[in-house]
Image (cartoon, rainbow, N blue to C red):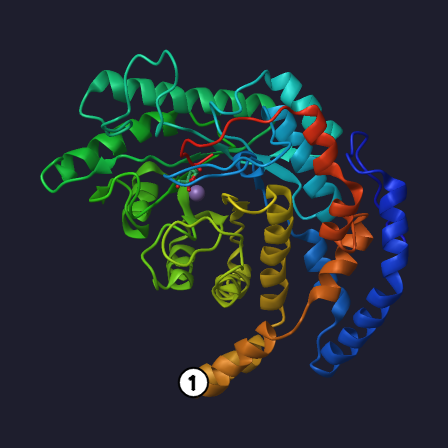
Amino acid sequence: MSGVASDAPGAPIERDRLERANAAEAPALEADHDALAGLLERRGIDIDTAVQRARAFGVAIPSWGVGTGGTRFARFPGTGEPRHVFDKLDDCGVIQQLTRATPTVSLHIPWDDEDPAELRERAAALGLGFDAMNSNTFQDQPGQAHSYKYGSLSHIDAATRAQAIAHNRHCIEVGQAIGSRALTVWVGDGSNFPGQCDMGGQFERYLASLGEVYAALPADWQLFTEHKMYEPAFYSTVVQDWGSNLMIARELGPQASCLVDLGHHAPNVNIEMIVSRLLHAGKLGGFHFNDSKYGDDDLDSGAIEPYRLFLVFNELIGAEASGATPSYMLDQSHNVTDPIESLMNSAIEVQRACVQASLVDREALSHHQANNDALMASETLKAAFRTDVSPILARARQLEGGAIDPIALYRDAGYRTRVASERPAVGGSGGGIV
Ligand code: PSV
Ligand code: MN
């Protein structure tokens, strides 16, 4: 079966190559798909419904994710790294062309602050749209009047707060010009030593500042606030946890909701329960997906704890009837892999968790819950999680005009080698998150 969707005019990988690879892989996919269809049918599940869910799935790519990341100690650059936002968009175009699961890009200002008309034009040529804008008041920019060393929206100094508010308003303006409909605010504000800050006063200043940002939101926009337990502030952070985040969203109003970054919690915290609580409150705005072993490791989604990712989606799908439609975004940093490959993998892993969770026998689950049958309730979830839905994901890509095997095709197409010859190598050594 050949793809029914065509490429965007600026699609980076030649269509012929894609068609040839898909044609070679199609018979095996057909066989795997049919075997899975039979297995699912015996469980009363129609595979086409699952394929449809996979086709409808989309997760935004973080523009900063296509660059090689680093730690506080060093950054080891890769080859052909994007030099600016237009290169980043090209890389995102590859990811979308091959996976068809990443139709939008989430920009970070000022890292990506370029002419909105040019941004829109380049994105459109690649078949991409724009997701939430991200403001940045956790770094100082050249020529900036007031430093964020001791905070931004919650700073003790009114002029510094005003500067941070103005920056967030600028992000909204850029976003409006490129068709975004949301602003995500994460601040590094907090304290490193007990007694360094009046935590109550700091929170009040943050709320007042963010209220001014909220007041500038267009009527059809959303404001997502992102909580994070630590880093760069190591003793306390202003938006520490989902409780603080919920307070903020409630205080600001109906256009405000909480963003859950999977890496921003203490180890072993039950994130799916947080998701459930925020759904209950009607305040779950979106996600930053990534995975971690110890802290905010920013590893590829599903790399360490795929079951937790599945359990998050189990909550989301279980609550679908409530009409909640949180935004899905990746937020990762790739230190030892090719960022394009990692982002393709992650998008597919998040899509996988979504499709697996849609296979949960919810009637059986309710029955076991009603009977306090913990073992069978758990087994009901496991039955869905253990189902290898790879043929469903591959079939969705094939039908959408993407690649049956995106990573193999990406490697074979030599995209990285080609852009490496066009993009001069950038320096390494210094630490940093981007
Ligand atoms: C902070 O750690 C964060 O998760 C926020 O989303 C930032 O915008 C992003 O990472 C920057 O890398
Ligand atoms: Mn994040």
Give coordinates of residue 285: x percent, y percent: 46, 46
Secondary structure, mark 1, is helix
Residue at image x 52%, y 79%?
365
Q: Quadrant of ligand 1?
A: top left
Q: Nearer the viewer, residue 408 or 188?
A: 408
User: Can I make out residue 66 in this image?
Assistant: yes
Residue at image x 53%, y 24%?
112
Please name the amino acid that badge 1 sits on.
Ala
Describe residue 303's horizontal placement relative to residue 429 as left or right.
right
Residue picked out by circle 1: 374
- For the N terminus, which image quadrant? bottom right
For mark 1, does the 10 Å Cα neighbourhood hold few (<14), some (14 to 19), or many (20 or more) residues? few
Residue lying furthest front in this view? 429
Q: Nearer the viewer, residue 199 or 74?
A: 74
Q: Quadrant of residue 238?
A: top left
Say if 412 sits above or below 386 in the image.
above
Give coordinates of residue 335: x percent, y percent: 51, 44
Give coordinates of residue 195: x percent, y percent: 9, 39
User: Can I make out residue 1 in this image?
Assistant: no
Q: Nearer the viewer, residue 329 or 295?
A: 295
Q: Quadrant of residue 188?
A: top left
Q: Is mark 1 within 8 Å of ligand 2?
A: no
Residue at image x 41%, y 34%?
432
